[in-house]
Image (cartoon, rainbow, N blue to C red):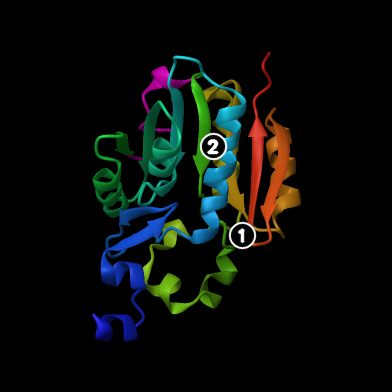
């Protein structure tokens, strides 16, 4: 294990697990490791869910680009009654997420919304997405742990880092329930453009950040009517 770590393998992949929001999640080799800063997105989503209680109905949560399934699992644990769906395009990530999500929801393999059941359209209360947001030209500047041992598809966000975020946002209004929320992690530098993208897709944009965790997220809310 020491030799594997010395060769640059992320500690979480060496151990086979990561702590996230107080949970111990399986992390398989070749899967994106959930970051501590992403806990801020979970807390923001949890707060929004409590602001708009669903009564006896479950809170419908969709976790796109789910990786280990960390966001969806953390929300399923934090909220009382959750109907959880997750998807990822990478087969290794899907196998890992299914171990973490087991008993809490369903994980699909496919490109963003493509594998999700169409009956979810217009029903999603919380749409969370830790999309890749590193600009392509900056991938080579990442630490070895990420650049070599995590899948490029989980890191590369295209020319400006926002390509996948654009695709998620473009269809979000079709899937969100009235008053539902989209939450996407981004960087402080990219946030102004990300907010413009959200507004351009018919959602009410808002920015939230945490200096303590070095986290920046953009939130888009579907109008009630």
Residue at left 26%, top 64%? 16
Q: In the image, which disc is placed on residue 159?
A: 1
Residue 112 visible in this rendered orientation of the protein: no
Residue 217 visible in this rendered orientation of the protein: yes
Q: Does residue 222 sit above or below 184 in this rendering? A: above
Report which quarter residue 12 is drawn in: bottom left
* Front in this rendered view, residue 206 or 111: 206
Q: Label 2's element?
A: helix
Among numbered discs 1 and 2, the one appearing first in the sequence: 2
**At which x and y percent is residue 19?**
38, 59
What span is colored magenta in the figure? 109-121
Bin the neighbour count of mark 2 within 10 Å (Cα to Cα): few under 14, some 14-19, many 20 and up. some
Residue at left 70%, top 41%? 197
In the displayed structure, does residue 182 sit left or right of residue 205? left
**At which x and y percent is residue 85?**
37, 33
Q: Main secondary structure of the magenta part?
A: loop
Residue 118 on the magenta span: yes
Q: In the image, which disc is placed on residue 187?
A: none
**At which x and y percent is residue 37?**
55, 58
Bin the neighbour count of mark 1 within 10 Å (Cα to Cα): few under 14, some 14-19, many 20 and up. few
**At which x and y percent is residue 93?**
31, 52
Task: Kindly indicate whether the residue at mark 2 contacts the one at mark 1 (C-beta within 8 angstroms).
Answer: no
Marks 1/2: CA–CA distance? 32 Å
Residue at left 59%, top 42%? 44
On-image quarter of the C terminus: top right
In the displayed structure, does residue 115 sit left or right of residue 158? left
Report which quarter residue 34 is drawn in: bottom left
Report which quarter residue 110 is drawn in: top left
Residue at left 60%, top 43%? 166
Q: Label 1's element?
A: loop
Residue bearing mark 2: 46
Q: Does residue 194 sit above or below 150 in this rendering? A: above
């Amino acid at each position: 294990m020491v030799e594997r770590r010395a060769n640059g393998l992320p500690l979480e992949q060496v151990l086979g697990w990561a702590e996230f929001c107080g949970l111990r999640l399986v992390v398989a080799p070749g899967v994106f490791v959930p970051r501590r800063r992403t806990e801020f997105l979970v807390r923001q989503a949890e707060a929004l869910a409590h602001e708009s209680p669903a009564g006896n109905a479950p809170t419908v949560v969709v976790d796109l680009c789910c990786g280990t399934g960390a966001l969806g699992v953390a929300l399923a644990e934090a909220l009382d009654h959750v109907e959880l769906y997750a998807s990822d395009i990478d087969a290794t990530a899907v196998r890992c997420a299914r171990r973490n999500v087991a008993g809490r929801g369903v994980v699909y393999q496919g490109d963003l919304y493509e594998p999700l059941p169409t009956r979810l359209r217009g029903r999603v209360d919380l749409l969370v997405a830790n999309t890749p947001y590193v600009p392509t030209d900056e991938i080579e500047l990442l630490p070895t742990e990420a650049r070599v041992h995590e899948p490029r598809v989980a890191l590369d966000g295209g020319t400006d880092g926002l390509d996948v975020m654009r695709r998620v946002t473009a269809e979000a209004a079709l899937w969100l329930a009235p008053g539902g929320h989209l939450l996407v992690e981004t960087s402080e530098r990219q946030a102004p453009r990300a907010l413009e993208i959200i507004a351009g897709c018919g959602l009410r944009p808002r920015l939230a950040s945490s200096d303590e965790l070095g986290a920046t997220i953009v939130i888009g809310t579907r109008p009630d009517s």
